[in-house]
Amino acid sequence: MMKHVTAIIEREDGGYVSFCPEVDVASQGDTIEEARNNLREALELFFESASEEELRERLRGEVFVTSVEVAVG
């Protein structure tokens, strides 16, 4: 079974951090692709090992990613 989840990737200290807000799982890598692949691996391990109770507690519904314009200064 395949599941689509959100992957947020941002540059941090010469590398990249990847994060999945639906289950609060994070990883990292030297490149965007490596961070994405490492997150995929971390998520697959999470879904393989998490109990049904943990999945119910941690798995969030829809996550919406958008931008917001704010006044600065």
Image: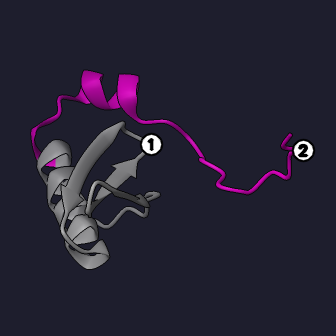
Q: Secondary structure at mark 2?
A: loop
Amino acid type of the residue tagged 2 in the rendering: Ala
Residue drawn at (37%, 28%), measured in percent from left and top?
58
Residue placed under numbered mark 2 in the picture: 71
Residue placed under numbered mark 1 in the picture: 22
Q: Residues within 10 Å of mark 1 (few under 14, many from 20)?
A: some
Task: Give coordinates of residue 64: x percent, y percent.
Answer: 66, 51
Please state if 16 lies on the left or on the right of 38 as rendered: right
> Which of the image's four quarters has the N terminus?
bottom left
Task: Give coordinates of residue 63: x percent, y percent.
Answer: 59, 47
Please state if 54 lies on the left or on the right of 10 as rendered: left
Label 1 vs label 2: CA separation?
29 Å
Sequence-wise, which precedes: disc 1 or disc 2?
Answer: 1
**Residue farthest along the right direction in this orientation:** 71
Q: Is residue 37 above or below residue 63?
A: below
What segment is highlighted magenta in the picture? 48-73
Please state if 21 lies on the left or on the right of 42 as rendered: right
Task: Give coordinates of residue 72: x percent, y percent.
Answer: 84, 43
Q: Residues within 10 Å of mark 2 (few under 14, many from 20)?
A: few
